Image (cartoon, rainbow, N blue to C red):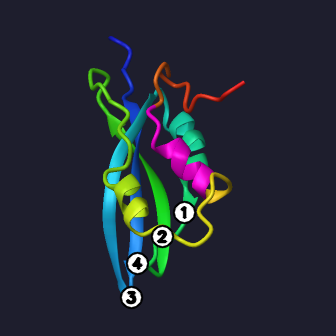
């Protein structure tokens, strides 16, 4: 009897924007490959939470969902679709590279050089 091979996991990033009472999904992307759901969830914790709110929107929230994938599936890190353009078109007050804006910059940079199960790279 062969040992059962478990699947891998990836993070799907979702950006929720609220315009008046309607919530829309502005974009999504994939981030990394993880050996276990626990590793994936640990990395996803850092990606969840509120983001700067573009003018004209009532709220913005970035969610991260771990999904199982097959061992033979390759995941390319992709920046959230349309996120940069959205904030360039409608920047919120006090746009700076700190707090939530720092998180936006981190999300839009592909995690080059990351190995399986390693999660996000950290700068020295």
Q: Quadrant of residue 72?
A: top left
Residue 59 in picture, x, y percent from top left: 49, 76
Instruction: Report if the CB atoms under discs 3 and 4 are less than 8 Å apart.
Output: yes
Q: Secondary structure at mark 3?
A: loop
Residue 69 in picture, x, y percent from top left: 31, 34
Tell which circle, 2 or 3, labels the residue nearer the N-terminal end.
3
Label 1 and label 4: CA atoms lie apart by 12 Å
Residue sitting nearer the eye, 29 or 45 = 29
Q: Is residue 83 visible?
A: yes
Does the segment drawn in magenta span residue 105? yes
Residue 92 in picture, x, y percent from top left: 52, 71
Q: Which residue is mark 3?
A: 20
Residue sitting nearer the eye, 44 or 3 = 44
Q: Quadrant of residue 123?
A: top right
Residue 71 in picture, x, y percent from top left: 32, 23
Q: Which residue is mark 1?
A: 51
Q: Is residue 33 above or below residue 56?
A: above
Q: Is residue 122 left or right of residue 111?
A: right
Label 1 and label 3: CA atoms lie apart by 17 Å
Q: Which residue is mark 2?
A: 60
Residue 18 disc label: 4
Instruction: Report if the CB atoms under discs 2 and 1 are less than 8 Å apart.
Output: yes
Secondary structure, magenta segment, majority class:
helix
Label 3 and label 4: CA atoms lie apart by 6 Å
Instruction: Report if the CB atoms under discs 2 and 4 are less than 8 Å apart.
Output: yes
Label 2 and label 1: CA atoms lie apart by 6 Å
């Amino acid at each position: 009897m062969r040992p059962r091979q478990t699947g891998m996991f990836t993070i799907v990033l979702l950006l929720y924007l609220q315009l008046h009472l309607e919530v829309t999904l502005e974009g999504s992307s994939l981030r990394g490959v993880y050996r276990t759901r626990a590793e994936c969830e640990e990395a996803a914790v850092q990606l969840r939470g509120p983001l700067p709110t573009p003018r004209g929107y009532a709220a913005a929230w970035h969610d991260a969902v771990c999904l199982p994938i097959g061992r033979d599936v390759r995941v390319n890190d992709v920046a959230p679709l349309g996120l940069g353009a959205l904030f360039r078109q409608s920047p919120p007050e006090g746009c700076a590279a700190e707090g939530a804006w720092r998180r936006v910059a981190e999300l839009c940079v592909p995690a080059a050089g990351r190995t399986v199960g390693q999660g996000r790279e950290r700068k020295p």
